Amino acid sequence: MLKNNMVVNFFCDFNPFFTSSALANRYEGLLKGLMHENVTINLFILGGYNSIEEIRKRHCYINSPFLKITYLVHTLNSTLFLRRVNNYILGRLVSRICDYKLRKAFQLPADYCWIAGGNNIRKSFLKYQLWIKAPKSIIEFSEFQQLYKNDATLPTFKIERLEQEYRVTCDVIKSVDCILVMTKRLEHYYKSLSKSHTNFLHLPMTVDLSRFQHISIANKYRKPYIAFTGTYSNAKDGVDILIKAFAKIVSKYPNYSLLLAGFYHYDVSKQKELIAQLGLNDKISYLGTLDKEQIPELVCNASLLVLPRPDSHQAQGGFPTKLGEYLATGNPVCVTKVGEIPDYLEDNFSAFMATPGDVDSFADAMDRALSDSEKAKQVGRSGRKVAENNFNIDVQAKRLVRFLKDNQNIGH
C-alpha cells in the first residue's frame, strides 16, 4: 500500500460509534483521530447490531471518505431474548458465517491488520495468518491479563473458558508486530509476554475534547449535584466508598445530591441497603446506563465529578477513561491516588486527590472541592489543561500515525 495513504483493516466485535463503554470510546477516539490524519479505516464488525438505531444509521452516523463499515453478520442483539437466540439457537451457523467472512476480510489489502476484537477474532487471526494480506498486525491492551483470578465468585466452567481465552491471547501477543498499551506498567508486563522484535507504543488514555464543549445547561438534573460515571462495582470503582464519603459531608452541603450513572453490577443491591441505612434515599439517584451522547450533559453540568477507585491489580495497570472525560469538562475532579493517576495529576492543583480505600480521605477531598468554589474552578481549569496536554486525541493520533509509518519501514 502507498505509505502516504495508509490503510488499516480494523476487526472488532461491535461498532464503537454506536456502543457506550470505555473500550468503545477508546476505539472511537482512535479511529476518528486516524481518519483526521487521512488514514483509511476498513471497519469489520463481527457481533451484529446492538440496536434498531444502529441498523438505521450505520452508514450515515460518521460521514467520512476515510471510513468504510462492513458487518460480517446481520444479527440484532437489542434484547436479552434476541441475544439468547443468536447465541444458543443460531450460534453454530453464525460462527461458521463469521469464520468464512473473516477469512475473506483478512485477504483484503491494507497496511495494517488491527485485532481489536475478542476471542473469536483472535482465534481466526491465528488460524488465517498466512491468508492475511496486510504486512503488519497490531493489537492494543488497556489492562492486565488474567484479572479473573482475583474474582473468587466466578464458577469453575467460566474460569476454564477464560483460561482458554488467555492462552489464545498469549499466542496472538507472540504473533503480532505492534502492541499499543495505555500505561507504562502494561508495557513492562506485555513485553515479558511478547517476542523481542515486537514494537511497543505507550498510548495514554485518549479523549475527544470537543465532546465536552458548548454543552447546553441540563434541565433533567436538579442542580447542584455531584456526578459519578462508570460501573456500579465496589471492587472496581469504589461506589460503596463514595456513598459512605458522601454521607459524611451531606449535612454540610444539604443542597447537593449524588447522581450515579453506570453499568449494572450485582453490588447495587448492597449499595441500596447501605443508602437506606444512612438515610440517603432522597439524596442519591441511580441513573442506569446512559448513551454516550448523554454523558457530556451530565458531567459538564456537575459541580463535582468523583472517582473513588480502590487500589487493585486492575487499577495498577489500567487508566480510567472516565477520568479523561471528567478533566475535559473543566469541572473540579475528586479522584484517588491509584495506578498512574498521580503521574499526571497534582493534589489541590489539577485535582482533589484522596487515599484509595479510605472513606475519610475521600470525604475530605470532596469537602475541599465544595468548600471553596473559586479554588475548585481553578483546579478544574488546571485539570482541563492536563487533558489537553496528555490525553487529547488529536495529539495522540499524530503519535500513533508516526508510530505506524515508522513500523512500515521495519522488516517483517
Image (spheres, helix red, strand yellow):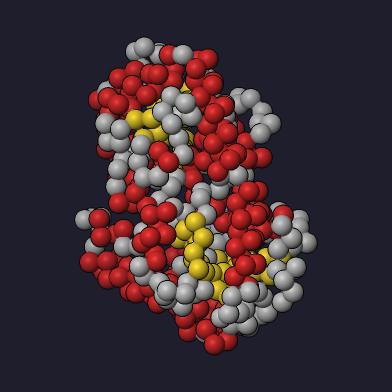
Residue 122 located left or right of residue 243: right
In the depicted structure, whether residue 252 falls above or below residue 137? above
Q: Residue at left 71%, top 57%?
A: 37
Viewer-proximal residue among 380 and 298: 380
Q: Residue furthest right?
A: 65
Relative image position of residue 49 (x, y in whole percent): 58, 62
Q: Residue at left 40%, top 72%?
A: 194
- Residue 220 visible in the shown view: no
Q: How many marks?
A: 0
Q: Quadrant of the N terminus?
A: bottom right
Q: Residue at left 55%, top 74%?
A: 137
In the depicted structure, whether residue 125 falls above or below residue 395? below
Relative image position of residue 304 (x, y in whole percent): 48, 25
Q: Residue at left 61%, top 56%?
A: 399
Relative image position of residue 298 (x, y in whole percent): 55, 32
Quarter of image, res 161 = bottom left
In the depicted structure, whether residue 376 falls above or below residue 72? above
Residue 69 located left or right of residue 93: right
